[in-house]
Amino acid sequence: MQEFLQQLVNGLVWGSAYALIALGYTMVYGILRLINFAHGDVYMMGAYSALFISGWLTAAGAPVAQSPLWAMVAMLGAMAAAGLLGFLIERLAYRPLRAAPRLTLLITAIGVSLFLQNVAQLAFGSEPRSFPELIPSSTILQVGSITLSNQQAIIIAVSVVLALALQVIVHRTSIGRAMRAVSYDREAAALMGISVNRVISFTFVLGSALAAAAATLIALNNPLVTPTMGVQPGLKAFVAAVLGGIGNIYGAMAGGLVMGVAEVMIVGYGSSGYRDGIVFAILIVVLLVRPTGLFGSPVTERA
Amino acid sequence: MDLARILRFAAVITLLLALQALFASGLVNPYYVRVLILCCFSVMLAVSLNIIIGHAGQFSIGHAGFYAVGAYSAGAFTVYAGPPIGQALGLDRLPVWLEGTAFLMGAVCVGTVFAALAGLAVGLPSLRLRGDYLAIATLGFGEMIRVVIQNVEAVGGPRGFSGIPIYSSFFWAALFAVTTVWIARNLARSRHGRALLAIREDETAASVLGINVTKHKVAAFVLSSALAGCAGALYAHYEGYLEPRSFDFIRSIEIIIMVVIGGMGSTTGAVIAAVILTLVPELLRGLAEYRMVIYSALLILFMLVRPQGLFGTWELSWETLRARWEKRRERP
C-alpha cells in the first residue's frame, strides 16, 4: 500500500508536467483544429533555452544552482524564448495556410516538428547534454515510507500555479474571452471585431511558454537534454489532451495526471519495456470507446 | 490475358533478369546496386501508402508499423520455421539458388499475410474515425507495433534481429516494386478504385450513392498494409538484420513525405518522389547531417507553395504526355 501511494505521488508529479504540455496542445486544437505536432519540439527547445540561460546566468555570476529565485529567472527566460518560437512557427508556417485544408496544416506541423528536431541536432549536437542541478534535491515531507522531495513539490506547485494563471487568463481577461470566442466560431468572432490572427498568435505563445515551463520542471528530475527529447513527452501529452477531451482545458490537466500515473504504475508494477506502449494503448481505447475524450462534448466533425 | 500483355510481362522479366545478371557479374559498383534496391523498397512503401492516403483520402501515419510486421514475421519464418520445413520438403537437396528462392517466396507470403492481418486489425476499428482522429489512431497503432517488437526476445528485442539469411536480390526487389505499381494502377482504374476516389472526395455523398464506405476503406487499408508487409519481407532478406528503430515514427513520416511530395493520389508521382527522396540523400553524402533538415524544410515549403505535390493527382504515362503535347500544339 505504501509503495502504491509512493508510486501515486511520483505519477502525479510526472503527470502535472505532462498536463502543462497537454494544455498547449489542447488550446491550439481548440482554436485551430490542428494537432500541433511541433509542440513536443517546442518543449525540447524550451529545455535547451533553460539550459543555455542558466549557463549564461552562472557565467555572469548569478548563483543559479543555489537560489530558487535564479532558477525561476531561468525558467521565465525559457518560457519567453519558447513563446517567441511558438509565435514564429505560427506566423511563418501555419498562418499562410489559414484557408488550406486541414490535412495540409497537419502535414506542415509534422514538417515543422522534424525541422526543429534536426535544426537542434545540427546546432546543439546529438549527444545528450546534462542540465545543471538547479535545485539540489532534499526530502521535505515524509509520511511513513512515502517521501516527497522538494523538487517534486516544486514541480507540482509551479504546475498548479501556472494552470491557475491560465485559468484566470482564459476566463477573466478580455483576450481570454476572445480566445473562447474564436474557438467557438472563428468567422462570427471576426465579425464581432476580434482580431483572430492576434488571438491565435497569443494562444501559441501561451501554449509554448507552458511547454517550456514543463521542460524546466522536468529537467529538475531528469537532467538530460537531447534534440529528440520532445518526441515521447510530446506524444504522451498529446494523448493526455485526447484523453481529457481535446480542446478542453480541465480535460487536458486531468488527462495529464492520468497519463503520468499510468506510466509510473506500468514501470513500477509491469515491465518498463512497455512504458511507451501503455500510453498508446490508452489512446486507442479512448479513441474507440469515446473519441471525444472523458470531458469532451460530442462534436460532429466537419470535413 | 491477351498476347500483348503477356509479351509486356515477359519483356519486364527479361529486362530485370538481364539487369540482375549484369549486377551479379560485379561490373557495376555494388554500392549503386544497393541504392537501386533501396529505391525499390521506397517505391513499394510509397505506392502502397498512396493507396490509402492518396486514393482513399485517409490520413494514416503508422505505415512503418506494417512494414515492420512484414519484415519481422518473414524473418522469423525463415529463421525458425525455415530449416525444419526445408528438411521435411527436401528443399535442401535443391540447388542453393532455388532453395533460397523457395524460402524467399514462403517468407514473402508470410510477411504479406501477417501485415494484411495487422492491417485488418488496425483498420476495422480505426477506420470508423475520421480525419485527425484516424491519424492519431494509426500513429498509436504504429508505435504499439514497434513497442511490442522491441519486447519480443525471440526477434532480438531492442538489440535487433540478426541472422536472417540473405535471399532477396535486385531482381526480386524490382519485380515486386513493378508488381506493386501495377496493382496500384489497376486498382485506381477499377470499380473499387473509383469507389475510393468517391470516398476521398466526399464520404457522406459516397455513402448516399450506395457505396459501402467502411468496406472499401478497410479493403484498401488491408491491401496497403499487405504491400508494405511484402516490402518488409524482401527488406528483411536483403539486409539480414532488422532493428526496431528503423521502423519508428520517423520512418512512417519519411514514407508520408514521399507520398505528399509526389502528389497525393498520383501513383507515378509516388514512384518518382520515392526514387528522388532515396537518391538525393545518397547523392548529397557530404551533406548527410543536413539531410533531414532539407527534407523537413522541403516538406514545409511544398505545403506552403504547392500543397498538391509534384504531380497532384496527375498520372505520368504515354497517353497523358501525348495529350499534353497535343494541347500545347493546338494553342496558337
Image: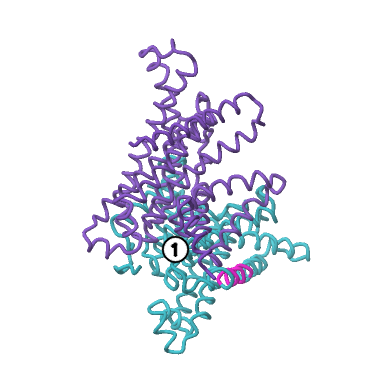
Chain colours: A cyan, B purple
Q: Which residue is mark 1?
A: A103
Q: Give me the residue at 49% from left, 19% from top.
A: B97
The residue depicted at 56 percent of the width and 68 percent of the height is: A93
The mark total stands at 1
Residue at position x 46%, y 30% in the image:
B155
Q: Position of residue B131 (x, y in %)?
A: 37, 61
Position in image of residue A254 (x %, y %):
39, 63
Residue B156 can be seen, yes or no: no
Question: Could one spot residue A255 in this view of the protein?
Answer: yes
Is disc 1 surrounded by few (<14), some (14 to 19) or many (20+) residues within 10 Å? some
Identity of the residue furthest to the top in this view:
B93
Residue A20 against residue A232 in the figure, above or below: below
User: Does residue B162 appear to the left or right of A185 in the view shown?
Assistant: right
**A133 over A274 or under it: above or below:** below
Horizontal side of B14 relative to A302 (left or right) equals: right
Task: Report the span colored magenta.
Answer: A81-90
Q: Nearer the viewer, residue B267 or A90?
A: B267
